Image (spheres, grey):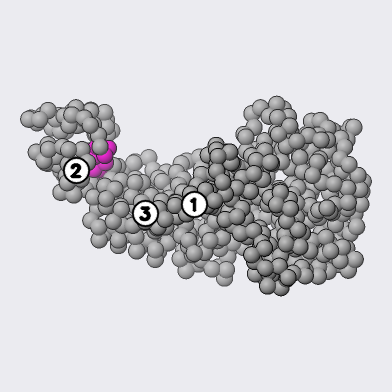
Amino acid sequence: MTKIFKMHLGEGGIDEPRAINEGVLLMGWSQEDMTGYSLDDIKSVFRRDWPHESTRAVGRIAGMTHTFWNVVSVGDYVLTKWKTREGIGVGKIIGPCRKDEISGEDLRPVEWLSLDIDKAALGEDLQSQLRPPMTISEVRVADGIARIEQIVATGEDPGPNRYSVEGTMVTRDELPGRFDLMLPVLHALNDLGGEAWRQDLFATLADNLDLPQSMREILHGDGPQTEFDYQAAWTLSYLRAIDALDRMDPRYWKITDTGRWYLQNSTNEELVERHRKLDRKLDDGKYSVDDIVQDGCFVEQQRISNILERLRSKKNLILQGPPGTGKTWLAKRLAWALVGWKDASHVRAVQFHPNLSYEDFVRGWRPSSDGKLELMDGLFLEIVAAARGDAEGAYVLVIEEINRGNPAQILGEMLTLLEADKRNPDNALELTYKREGEQGIHLPPNLYLVGTMNIADRSLALVDLALRRRFAFVDLMPEIDKRWQTWVKKQCGFDDSVLSDIQERMANLNQTIESDSKLGRQFQIGHSYVTPPPGIETDPSTWYRDVVKSEIGPLLDEYWFDEPSKAQGEREKLLEGLDWL
């Protein structure tokens, strides 16, 4: 069966002149002739030759090499979006893959049928598949071969003949649904060596199911995604929810050890039931403000609700306070409450530090597996893409120690786009590192940022006014009060007299710190220092003495570094005269 592939010819199009002049497609990763090698064989070669590369990088390069050598066939079509000239090139494979005797590069002879197809003449579904990230990948669109032939003949894409299920003689009952595909997806991914790019996985899945081409090409709605791909994409999310799959990249999937166990021991019906049980559990276990309180938050419940509402309206919020006031702890729980449940795919976390840059966080050039530089998106654009693709869900990025790095430098133009009233296409801005043909970017309204800020660390920079204007700021202070005492007693079984003693001594210490002209309120000691882990089984006196000596004491030494006797005196006040010690 004739197939269509897209291919990029070198970073910045460096191999395009040779490809056109000599009629060849080029890749340069392999060290030997890979004819007839399985994907596992190719992975073994790259692991041997590149022992220091990550498993993900080896899998990615091996997959593309396998496609170039053993999946592409004579008679297949290739599309390339030129970087050194205008338009789209369309070629036809006319020979097997071989090694260049001089350079050692992988070559495939190609006959260029057209070099200057106008990109605007292609349908949206074709255009979307010409974009990075892969050097080579299969293009799967409705009526693909007939459309390519028309594009070469007329320069125009006639579009697919079948626009929806309703526009064909096929009924929806004849198409495999998302629940029908759970076990077949695991088999297809296993056939590909356990990991693969999504479109390669879907192609193998369709082949394994012997799905007729006419059924593969039916579009979902008015496109550009096919109905089969749409259903299979849902299946991937279901399998990920039951830990059968792991997503290494938005488009790259890997089977887990749990998935392999399912493959050997479960039927498709059992997998469906496992997911439905999980669905029911999630429905019963949604995360809310009540759960934050039950987890051990000592902030008054109504105030938590107010903070959450402020986050919803402002979109960006920073929790600031002295050390030990539970800023990161609360930030993640506010994120879960906003999302509605504990979901790692909707809540991501990062810590700012002096070495973090815009190139790490947003987008920048980084070394690729072939030794060249590749433009790669950072964590921020990854969660932006996830939020944009799921308009009904909330996505939260938690930034720990936001003032430990340089926020203005790390965020770049994103700082402007964070504003709630600028999250629309009219306020889009071009990125510092822009991909070819990329338009301006704006942030989706369902993306939220929660930062934490330690206001006692003298080494940290002050936050500039531009950042302050775009975030709501919430102060968290020590909450060593009745709520704290009730929770610790319930979770750890400490006596009321012990907890009252700790509460009084910590209050006296914090009053001393607040009244010191060199320190102040922002240097008080937070409740986290004197809150034992839930369920701890220990003698209260041993635990408290260890906390004072190993945690609070060293912090006091730092506070009064120029008055060591003062620090020692406050340390002794925390321990002396306690009947239960």
Residue 490 has which mark?
A: 2
- Residue pictured at 57% horizontal, 56% vertical: 179
**Quadrant occupied by the C terminus:** top left
User: Is disc 2 placed on a helix, strand or loop?
Assistant: helix
- Whether the residues at callouts 2 and 1 have beta carbons within 8 Å, the answer is no
528 or 44, which is in the foreground?
44
From this viewpoint, is residue 310 visible? yes
Q: Position of residue 88 (x, y in %)?
A: 81, 59
Pointer 1 or 3: first along the chain? 1
On the rendered structure, is 300 left or right of 190? Answer: left
Pointer 2 or 1: first along the chain? 1
Q: CA distance from mark 3 to mark 2?
A: 22 Å
Q: Position of residue 452 (x, y in %)?
A: 37, 49
Q: Nearer the viewer, mark 1 or mark 3?
A: 1
Magenta residues, start to end? 524-534
Mostly what secondary structure, the magenta segment? loop
User: Is disc 1 placed on a helix, strand or loop?
Assistant: helix
Q: Which residue is mark 3?
A: 285
Q: Position of residue 9 (x, y in %)?
A: 79, 47
Residue 516 has which mark?
A: none
